[in-house]
Amino acid sequence: MACVSNNSGNFHDWYLPSLQELMTIFLNQMTIYQTAKLHEGTNLSRNPAYWSSTESQSNPSYAMTVGAGFIQGLNKKAELSVRCIRSF
């Protein structure tokens, strides 16, 4: 819900990334950091896990610690960070 109601930058098409999209963020985190720094954006936190939109039957939902690339299946009641993204 946090991503759907996000109007950052006057854009209305933010969404919660899939696990694959979080992996892409992990693989490109240095470029993302440098770009964010140039545009006064926020850096990716190295420690907190970010929720993904990916779900399975054995684990209700998946999250990733982007700084380390650690993936974990967690109960949806766990309080984690979100990193909303847009397509371009």
Image: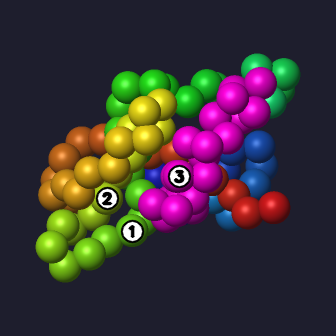
- Are the residues flagged by discs 2 and 1 in contact, CB closer than 8 Å? yes
User: What residue is shown with label 2?
Assistant: 62
User: What residue is shown with label 3?
Assistant: 23
CA–CA distance in space, label 1 to label 3 = 12 Å
The amino acid at mark 2 is: Tyr
- Are the residues flagged by discs 2 and 3 in contact, CB closer than 8 Å? no
Span highlighted in magenta in the image: 15-34
Q: Give the structural element (helix, strand or loop) at label 2.
A: strand
Q: Is residue 40 visible?
A: no
Q: For the N terminus, give its image quadrant.
A: bottom left
Q: Where does residue 3 sit, x and y in percent of width and height?
A: 52, 55
Which residue occupies the foreground of this view, 15 or 11?
A: 15
Q: Where does residue 71 sit, x and y in percent of width and height?
A: 33, 49
The amino acid at mark 3 is: Met
Q: Quadrant of residue 8?
A: top right
Above or below — where is 88 with respect to 50?
below
Query: Is residue 26 inside the magenta stretch?
Result: yes
Residue at 18% x, 67% y: name it. Answer: 59
Above or below — where is 45 with respect to 51?
above
Q: Nearer the viewer, mark 1 or mark 3?
A: 3
Q: Main secondary structure of the magenta part?
A: helix
- Mark 1 burial class by Cα count in 10 Å: few <14, some 14-19, many 20+: some
User: What residue is shown with label 1?
Assistant: 54
Q: Which mark is residue 80?
A: none
Marks 2 and 3, the one that precedes in the sequence: 3
Q: Is residue 15 visible?
A: yes
Q: Give the structural element (helix, strand or loop) at label 3.
A: helix
Q: Where does residue 27 sit, x and y in percent of width and height?
A: 61, 43
Which residue occupies the foreground of this view, 82 or 44?
A: 44
Which residue occupies the foreground of this view, 26 or 5?
A: 26
Relative horizontal placement of residue 60, taking residue 6 as reference (left or right):
left
